Image: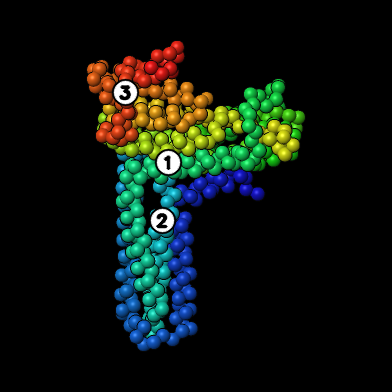
Amino acid sequence: MIPWATRFELRQYLKGSLWVLPLFGGLLGVLLAQAALWADGATRLPSHWNYSPSTASGVLTAIVGAMVALLGYVVTIGVLVVQQATGTLSPRYMRLWYRDGLQKAVLATFAGTFTYAFALLRRVEDDFVPDIGVTVAGVAVAVSLALLLIYLDRFTHNLRPVAVAALVGRSGQEVLADWTAQVRADGSEDRDVAAPRPGAPVLQVRAVRAGAMQAVNLGALLAAAERHDCTIVLARTVGDFVTVGTTVIEVHGRTPPPAPHLRALVALGRERTIEQDPAFAMRVLVDIAIKALSPAINDPTTAVQVLDHIEAFLEVAVSTELRGRYTLVDRAGVLRVVVPGRGWEDYLQLAVTEIRDYGAGSTQVCRRLRALLDGLLQTVSAERRPAVQDEICRLDAAVEIAFPDARTRAVALGSDRQGIGGRTGDVTASSPGGRWGGGANGHGRA
């Protein structure tokens, strides 16, 4: 039986592959050509549906040439996409672009039409013309052109930074909700566990190759822990890069499961994926924003638009039960699996730290960050509010350094959801603490 980690890696490869579906389309084209030839031999068509041998050969030859040209055209577009994504967006976004089903469908249709027309062309003779096949080939060309137009329209609109941010943000929100639901479905308790059991682990499962932790089979880990009456602790979280020899899993108990079995329940790859790692989606959003803030691009408006989707992501995180550690129990309520996670503060810090560092000199970015943090302050629970207040203080300190002039600093301290030009919030303080300055810890209201 193929190990779970190997199956996961295979699924990841197939999702990102640009040649598997086109190859299948090409093979399907050959099979459909054989079916069309059989139908031509078994059916007699009206005379006005018949083609002369020269006409059929000319049509099929033109289709073969056109499909080759269109395949090259789509490949050229793909190269341009790679250049734009790596230059103005984020190289991490390419993993999502590779998986676009429409692009693969277009390539598969072109390849299938090419092999279909070529297979028919070989059978055109003076005494036999595949009339049905030639007609179907014309229909396939029409379908190919329609898909090409849809493809061009989609990528013309979806390659804008704000469209990419919307796509990545939605993907991250869905993964965050799915991951939390999965942990809850596998028996997560409503409490954090500082230590699974006293004493040293009886087994440490170490990585045999380097790579990023892409996914973990929580259900299988829970079943293995219950079957062997032990507690399994993940020493690394999804998204971490581990080297050879790094401890990935610790087992507490008397009879640990076999190390190869546990190792096969953790998928490693060359880079992070979004399947069980919603923080990776936030990482991509932040990368797009800070690249827009680089001196080579200098596009703070794009950063502000990305902050819109970062805020939407954080709002979903606010309503999600996030903990630094998840504990899974069996049906009897016995602790079986401990999984490290990311808390609310981790997502907030990831979302705003680098954008604040690189955008502190932009009035537009500072004002949009202020609006984001002010909005979160109104929605987060009491225990999460100090983290937001601390980020506000850090933003005020960055503005203080970037804008020595008091009048300019007062503008940069404003709260504006459009960055500049929107509805401005009230700003009464120009000290590094801003509106939240004062108080023993800098978090009190002025």
Estimate the spatial distance between the alpha carbons at disc 2 and disc 1, rounded to whole Å: 20 Å
* Amino acid at the residue labelled 2: Leu
- Residue 39 point in image, percent of width and height: 47, 79
Coordinates of residue 441 in the picture (x, y in percent): 45, 14
Of the 4 image quadrants, the one containing the C terminus is top left
| Side of 287 where 266 appears, left or right | right
The x and y percentages for residue 425 are: 32, 28
Total marks placed? 3
Q: Which residue corresponds to the image point at 41% horizontal and 35% vertical from the top-left? A: 311
Badge number at residue 102: 2
Q: Which mark is residue 214?
A: none
345 above or below 430? below
| Crowding near the residue tagged with mark 3, few <14, some 14–19, many ≥20 C-alpha atoms within 10 Å | some
**Tag 2–tag 1 contact (CB < 8 Å):** no
* Label 2: how many Cα within 10 Å (few below 14, some 14–19, many 20+): some
Which numbered circle lies on residue 427? 3
Name the residue tied to disc 1: 169
The amino acid sitting under disc 3 is: Val
Could you say which is closer to the camera, residue 285 or residue 1? 285
Earlier residue among tags 2 and 1: 2
